């Protein structure tokens, strides 16, 4: 099946010190789809192409979805009118109804917010409207499943790519509550750290504060997932894994440009999604599946 052929597999990056005797008996407790940068839009037949991709994802029998933001093509530019914002979210709602049997946990993307609303009191202005569209409990939050702790962050603060002081304090408290050895997935729209972030200057500007905070929790197994760059990579720093998961939309559903290695790709990364297998010993396997649509 074309689905698996050509899949780029990223080996789990786990330090040998975290491996225990009997590790081969580890159990796969969760399978999660990480979809990001869907950038849904009426053009380029994007809704139908996304639906085909969704059918492929469903074949993996995932437990739930992590959605990394930039769900719609763009609401953030100055010239975007209300109708255009409505149009994009309506397409999304229709598509979401086609996999409503799955739970989905979202974070905000930089393109999701409509800052050009005529008034800040407009019900469609800013983050709160997106929180409603994506049925998020808040702009940042955490939850637990099958022994894993998931932290969903908001990358858009202080008019840049940053957590901001309030969220950073919340993150510090959230991590503090967890016992040593905890298995953690952190999802943000923009990478906290990444190699591909240099292409768009797209990494978190407060990476120094965040990496210092994570280093204080080096007794825990921390894995960070992001999107935003539309490129696929993996990095490890201070024993924390930093994965960037390409983009469902590839080159925004367009054919690409002179940098695209193939049609619809963004540079060397095909459109695709990640399937993450999480194990009860705190390890994970992260596999990127290109989709051909
Ligand atoms: Zn983005």
Image (cartoon, grey):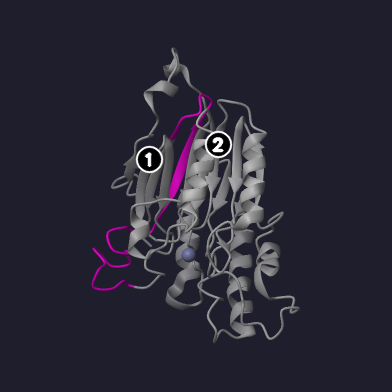
The residue shown at (54%, 42%) is 213
Q: Nearer the viewer, residue 212 or 284?
A: 212
Badge 1 marks a residue whose secondary structure is strand
The Cα atoms of the two marked residues, 2 and 1, are separated by 15 Å
Residue for badge 1: 236
Q: Nearer the viewer, residue 262 or 239?
A: 239
Badge 2 marks a residue whose secondary structure is strand
Quadrant of image for the C terminus: bottom left
Q: Residue furthest top?
A: 21
Query: What are the residue bounds of the magenta stretch?
Result: 255-284
Secondary structure mostly taken by the magenta-highlighted segment of the chain: loop
The residue shown at (34%, 56%) is 196
The image's mark for residue 190 is none
The first of marks 2 and 1 along the sequence is 2
Q: Nearer the viewer, residue 240 or 145?
A: 240
Q: Quadrant of residue 53?
A: bottom left
Residue for badge 2: 184
The residue shown at (61%, 29%) is 147
The residue shown at (45%, 65%) is 49
Residue 75 vertical placement versus 188 (above, below):
below
Q: Nearer the viewer, residue 220 or 94?
A: 220
């Amino acid at each position: 099946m074309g689905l698996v052929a050509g899949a780029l597999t990223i080996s789990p990056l786990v330090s040998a010190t975290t491996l225990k005797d009997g590790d081969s008996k580890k159990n796969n407790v969760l399978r999660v789809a990480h979809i990001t940068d869907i950038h849904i839009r009426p053009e380029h037949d994007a809704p139908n192409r996304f639906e085909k991709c969704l059918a492929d994802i469903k074949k993996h029998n995932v437990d739930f979805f992590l959605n990394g933001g930039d769900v719609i093509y763009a609401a953030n530019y100055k010239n975007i009118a209300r109708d255009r914002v409505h149009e994009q979210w309506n397409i999304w709602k229709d598509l979401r109804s086609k996999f409503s049997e799955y739970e989905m946990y979202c974070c905000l993307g930089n393109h999701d917010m409509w800052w050009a609303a005529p008034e800040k009191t407009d019900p469609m202005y800013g983050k709160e409207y997106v929180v409603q569209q994506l049925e998020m409990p808040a702009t940042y939050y955490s939850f637990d499943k099958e022994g894993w702790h998931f932290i969903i962050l908001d990358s858009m603060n202080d008019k840049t790519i940053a957590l901001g002081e309030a969220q950073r304090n919340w993150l510090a408290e959230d991590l503090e509550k967890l016992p040593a050895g905890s298995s953690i997935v952190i999802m943000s729209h923009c990478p906290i750290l990444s190699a591909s972030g240099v292409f768009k200057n797209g990494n978190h500007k407060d990476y120094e504060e965040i990496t210092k905070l994570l280093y204080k929790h080096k007794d825990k197994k921390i894995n960070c997932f992001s999107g935003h760059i539309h490129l696929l990579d993996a990095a490890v720093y201070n024993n924390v894994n930093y994965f960037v998961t390409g983009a469902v939309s590839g080159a925004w559903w367009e054919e690409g440009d002179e940098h695209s290695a193939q049609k619809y790709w963004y540079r060397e990364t095909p459109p695709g999604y990640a399937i993450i297998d999480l194990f009860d010993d705190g390890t994970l396997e992260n596999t990127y599946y290109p989709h051909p649509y």
